[in-house]
Image (cartoon, rainbow, N blue to C red):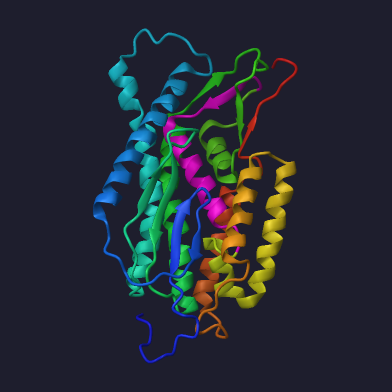
Amino acid sequence: MPSPPDLPDPYGGWPPVAEQVVPVETRYTTTSGRPPQRKWLHWTLFAATVATTWYVGVAHYLSFLWDFAPRPLLFTSQTEIILGGLWYAVPVLVILGAHELGHYYACRYHHIDATWPFFIPFPLGLSGTLGAVIRIRDPIRTKRALFDMAVAGPIAGFLALVPFLIWGLALSRVAKLPADLSGGGWLEIGEPLLLKTVTYVIHGQVASGFAVNWHPMVWSAWFGMLATAINLFPIAQLDGGHISYAVLGRKSDYISLVALASAGLLIFVSWSWVVWTALLLVMLRMFGWRHPPTFDDHLPISRGRVIVALIAVLMFIACFTPAPIQPLDLVTPR
């Protein structure tokens, strides 16, 4: 729905910015005018992200071939290894793209101007990318439009990652762990509830001393679940914060503070939350902890959208893990 042209704008036309990064966020800022889209920049960043995710995907594919024990691959060609990186790169780009296109088409549905996604390359770590970004260049004046824009991204990304998770776990295999993992360099990867459930359905109870060796597609789905869970935190400028505001109104400001405190407490569970909590503090310092108001601030949203909000809560529970990444420090061998 287009914004009513005859309404005054007491907030100065605060156009928001919708982003998906790790953390994935939708924030508000003030801009003037609408610069034309730089399509060459979108395609350049996308090409760079293809390269970085492909590069990381090769490492994931090598790890999959090794079965937890690096060794010469006598019957595997270099071409196969290089092409094997696409098992990770393609799914992760589809998942991130689906999330951002969910935001984009929800904006189009409500006649809100938004840019194409900007993909963010990152040649380090387990992901090869920091996500993607769209910039919203119109005010979002109603809670209905705000809710639809915010929830469409996580739902689209979630629907995209589930088939890759199932397919990837079907291609994964149970392998014996090395006798001694205490030499350093190993990482313990937290498994969200959805990942644990699908793993059990496909592979059953894994015996002690063994583990499921993830196919690269599982890594892409794991990254998608991490991004979805972070994005659904009910903190003011994240998608979860927008959903919370659309449902609860001003009460969502207190939910934001509780969620921020929870993120801080998670540092005692895993040091991987230090960076995330610091980014949250910077974001709230720049844009404030109170959600910007809408024109229909006093009106409730429909019952159907409340149900969708509950579905988003279930998605958060399914994708969340309290310890995403931490070093594996074992004193005694397994």
For the C terminus, the quadrant is top right
At x 33%, y 34%, the residue is 51
At x 57%, y 85%, the residue is 298
User: Residue 11 versus residue 147: which sits nearer the camera?
Assistant: 11
On screen, residue 274 versus residue 107, left or right, reads: right
User: Residue 15 versus residue 114: which sits nearer the camera?
Assistant: 15
The span picked out in magenta is: 208-235
**Residue 223 x/y as whole percent:** 49, 41
For the N terminus, the quadrant is bottom left
User: Would you say residue 234 is visible in this rendering?
Assistant: no
On screen, residue 208 versus residue 149, left or right, reads: right
At x 47%, y 17%, the residue is 66
**Residue 266 x/y as whole percent:** 71, 47
User: Would you say residue 231 is visible in this rendering?
Assistant: yes
**Residue 133 x/y as whole percent:** 41, 54
Give yes or no for residue 217 being in the magenta stretch: yes
User: Residue 35 versus residue 332: which sits nearer the camera?
Assistant: 35
